[in-house]
Image (cartoon, rainbow, N blue to C red):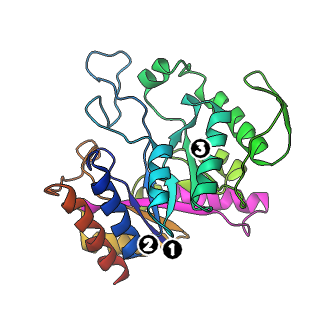
């Protein structure tokens, strides 16, 4: 099973040297990949109708995933990168296809694109995209991504997209893995149908039922023997005993990836304790503490 680390985007700060040290430490310790979250804008929650109830506000900084990973790819050689997830309907599909392809080229096929639909309607509105139609748009965007990554001249027409005999270059030498964020049966069904993996941004015990549902759907489709990944996350605040239990449980159920989440943003909303990391070095030290506990 692959062990990853969630980039502490809301807490690590903006010093490129600190970001470099965190990343190179993760690679040196044997982490297989780095996962990062995506928000273009943060919004105030107070006084809104409908209620804006997600874990992030206007006070939480987010490094832009494609730019961040381009920097990290240039200072590493083996560690992989995954968006967990890019809020796809907020972005132009053709541009995302181009950015993902370029990142895969420059990282020498170390990039996995995780996509989802998000929850922040203020962000959608600010980016000029209707929140209500995000699911339908998302489905059409997946078709656009796949078409543009095929290497062929694309002639695509739908109610939402028109590509008139065009293509993108350069393309990576291997297909870009397309994974889907999911915490619902609808999202699981979409991922099984269209993707190569599922990203469950929470502990294994909360999503074991969705993993089983995905496995059953794949069996019904006759695709259970084809490669497909399942990713969960484990919060640093839970402690060493639970880390080891969660990793073992997830692997036994068929999980393929698990990511350490060492950051406090959103912990209160999720009923988790906060950890005093004491500054940038604390986030770096947490990488070693977790890896020693789960891999020895």
Q: Residue at x 70, y 56 (%)?
A: 172
Q: According to the image, label 1 marks what residue?
A: 1
What is the spatial separation of the Cα atoms under label 1 and label 2, in whole angstroms?
Answer: 12 Å
Q: Residue at x 32, y 70 (%)?
A: 243
Give residue 219's position: percent from left, percent from top: 73, 63
Give residue 78's position: percent from left, percent from top: 51, 70
Q: Secondary structure at mark 2?
A: helix
Q: Residue at x 66, y 55 (%)?
A: 176
Q: Nearer the viewer, residue 112 or 247?
A: 112
Q: Return the disc, 3 or 1, that comes first in the chain's sequence.
A: 1
Quarter the C terminus occupies: bottom left
* Magenta range: 208-236
Nearer the observer, disc 3 or disc 1?
A: 1
Q: Using residue 285 as the reference point, say whether residue 130 is left or right of it.
A: right
Q: Return the disc, 1 or 2, that comes first in the chain's sequence.
A: 1
Q: Quadrant of residue 237?
A: bottom left
Nearer the observer, disc 1 or disc 2?
A: 1
Q: Is 225 part of what is drawn in magenta?
A: yes
Q: According to the image, label 2 marks what residue?
A: 249
Q: Residues within 10 Å of mark 1 (few under 14, many from 20)?
A: some
Q: Quadrant of residue 119?
A: top left
Q: According to the image, label 3 marks what residue?
A: 187
Q: Residue at x 67, y 60 (%)?
A: 216
């Amino acid at each position: 099973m692959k062990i990853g680390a969630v980039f502490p985007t809301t807490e690590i700060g903006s010093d490129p040297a600190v970001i470099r040290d965190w990343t190179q430490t993760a690679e040196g310790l044997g982490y297989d990949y780095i996962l990062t979250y995506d928000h273009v804008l943060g919004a105030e929650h107070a006084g809104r109708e409908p209620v804006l109830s997600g874990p992030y506000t206007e006070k939480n900084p987010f490094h832009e995933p494609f730019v961040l990973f381009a920097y990290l790819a240039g200072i590493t050689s083996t560690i992989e990168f995954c968006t967990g997830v890019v809020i796809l309907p907020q972005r132009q599909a053709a541009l995302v296809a181009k950015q993902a392809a370029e990142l895969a080229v420059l990282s020498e096929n170390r990039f996995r694109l995780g996509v989802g639909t998000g929850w922040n309607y203020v962000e959608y509105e600010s980016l000029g995209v209707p929140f209500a139609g995000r699911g339908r748009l998302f489905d059409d965007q997946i078709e656009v991504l796949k078409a543009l990554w095929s290497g062929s001249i694309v002639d695509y027409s739908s109610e939402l997209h028109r590509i008139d005999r065009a293509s993108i270059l350069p393309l990576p030498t291997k297909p870009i893995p397309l994974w889907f964020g999911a915490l619902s049966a609808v999202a699981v069904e979409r991922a099984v149908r269209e993707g190569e993996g599922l990203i469950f941004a929470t502990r294994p015990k909360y999503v074991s039922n969705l993993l089983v549902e995905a496995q059953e759907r794949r069996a019904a489709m006759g695709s259970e023997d084809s490669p497909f990944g399942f990713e969960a996350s484990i919060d640093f605040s839970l402690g060493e005993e639970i880390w080891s239990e969660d990793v073992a449980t997830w692997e036994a159920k068929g999980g393929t990836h698990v990511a350490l989440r060492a950051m406090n943003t959103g912990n209160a909303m999720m009923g988790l304790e906060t950890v005093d990391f004491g500054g940038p070095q604390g986030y770096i030290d947490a990488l070693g503490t977790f890896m020693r506990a789960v891999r020895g």
